[in-house]
Amino acid sequence: MKHPHLSRKHQPVTLLLLALVALPLCLSGCKDNSAKSEHATASAETLKYGTSTSATTATPAPAAPETAAPAAGTAQGTPEAGFTQQTSVSRNPKAGKAKTAAAAGAAAVKYRSGEDPDFAAKKGWPVKSPAPLPGSILPQKRIVAYYGNPLSKRMGALGEFPKDDMLQRLKREAGRWQAADPSHPVQPALHLIAVVAQGEPGKAGMYRMIMPDAVINKVYGWAKEANAIMFIDIQTGHDDIRAILPRFEWLLKNPDVHLGIDPEFNLIKSRAKPGNKIGTYDATDINYASGYLRDLVKKYNLPPKVLTVHRFTRNGVTNSRNIVLRPEVQIVMHMDGWGAPWLKRDSYKDYIVAEPVQFTGFKLFYHNDTKKGDPLMTPADVLKLHPKPIYIQYQ
C-alpha cells in the first residue's frame, strides 16, 4: 500500500492522521531487513532497527519476523553477555591469611554491560563540561518524557492515550523515578515528533511532514497544564537540519521548549527512503544545531537549552569527539534502541558510554521492549547503568 501524497495546501489537517496511520503499512517489515543488513556489514552493532522507526512507522508490534542482533563484541542470546568481573585480592604478604580468607569468602563483583564504573572511567567519564549556567535543568534534575505524536496512537505514549490519561500516566512515571532517586528532582516533559519522516516524497520531495502549528501549540498547552517542559523532535528525511530548524524559532524562543534530533532519519547522503536504511548525523550537524540553540539563548536571554540526539548504531553519530560543548546548550546522547534488557544495556555501553559527549539518556518502549516476553526495565534497573542516564524517555 503506498502512502498517500499529502498537500498541506489542499488537504485538511485531519488527513494527517490518515497519513500517519497509513505509513506503517508501507514501511512495516523494512526495519528488520535493515538490521540484518547492518549486522552483516557492521558486526552486529545495533539493537533491532526500529527504535525511532517504531515511532515514525508506528509499529509497536511489527508483523515481520524479528531477530535481535547483539552489540559488537558480545555473546548472542544470553543475558549474561557483557558481564565483567572485578576481584580484590591483596598482594601484601603481611596481609596474609586475613586478606586471603576475606577474598575467598567474598563473591566476585559482577557488572552487566553498561554498569561497570571502571569501564566508564576508562572511556572518559565523567566528562569535563562547562559549568551549568543559572536555569540549567541538567544535571540537577532528571527529565522524564513521554514521546510521540497526538495524531497517531502507534507512534508513542504521547499519542497512544487520551490527553488526561496520558498526563496522569506521565505523572505516575515521574513519581516512580523520584522515589528511585530522591537526589534528582524529576522534570516531566512531552517530546513531540514535530517533523515526521515519510515513506513517500510528498509535495516538497523531502520525505518528511512538518506538523501544523495548531498541533504543536496543542501539545505545548498540554505541557504547560502538566508543569512539563516540551521537546520538539525533528526527523529530516531528505531535508537539511539547517533548512528546517530555523522554522521553529517561534517555538524554541520559549524558555520551556527544547530540541531533539534523530540521526536515523537524516538520509540526505544515502537518498534512501525512510524505513529502508538507517541515517546518520556527523558532529558538524550536531554542532550546527547546538550553535543555533546557543544563539537563541543569547538572543532571547533564555536559560540553557537541552539538545537530545538519538543513537542506537555505530554510524548513527560520526566523529563524536568533535562535538562542541557550549554553556548555553546541554547535550544528551540518548540510547534509542529497543529489545531485551541485556541487549539495551549492550547498546548503551557500546554507543553511549564508549563515546562520551556530555549527558546520557535512555529510552523505554512500553510495547517493543516487552513484545517477546521480556520485562520493561524499571527505574532501579536503569539506575544501575554507569553513568546514570539523566534523561528518560517512554515511547
Image: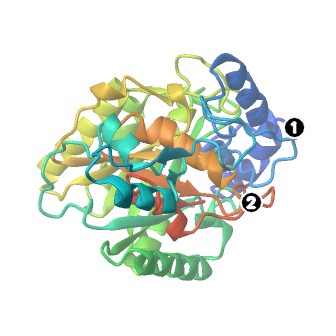
Q: What is the number of the mark on residue 65? A: none
**x, y percentage for residue 186?**
37, 73
Q: What is the number of the mark on residue 1? A: 1
**x, y percentage for residue 221?**
43, 72
Counting labels gives 2
On-image quarter of the C terminus: bottom right
Relative placement, left or right, of 40 versus 238 is: right
Give 181 or 260, whichever is nearer the viewer.
181
Label whose residue precedes the other's in the sequence (2 or 1) = 1
Classify residue 154 by image quadrant.
bottom right
Q: Please, what is the three-letter code of the amino acid marked with disc 1?
A: Met
Q: Residue at x 64, y 76 (%)?
A: 162
Give 19 or 28, whichever is nearer the viewer.
28
The residue pinned by badge 2 equals: 374
**x, y percentage for residue 214?**
49, 61
Give 245 or 326, whichever is nearer the viewer.
326
Residue 247 in sight from this viewpoint: no
- Residue 381, compared with residue 310, is above or below; it is below
Relative placement, left or right, of 295 versus 393 is: left
Local SS, label 2:
loop
**x, y percentage for residue 181?**
39, 74
Q: Residue at x 52, y 44 (%)?
A: 84
Q: Please, what is the three-letter code of the amino acid marked with disc 2?
A: Asp
Q: Residue at x 36, y 66 (%)?
A: 142
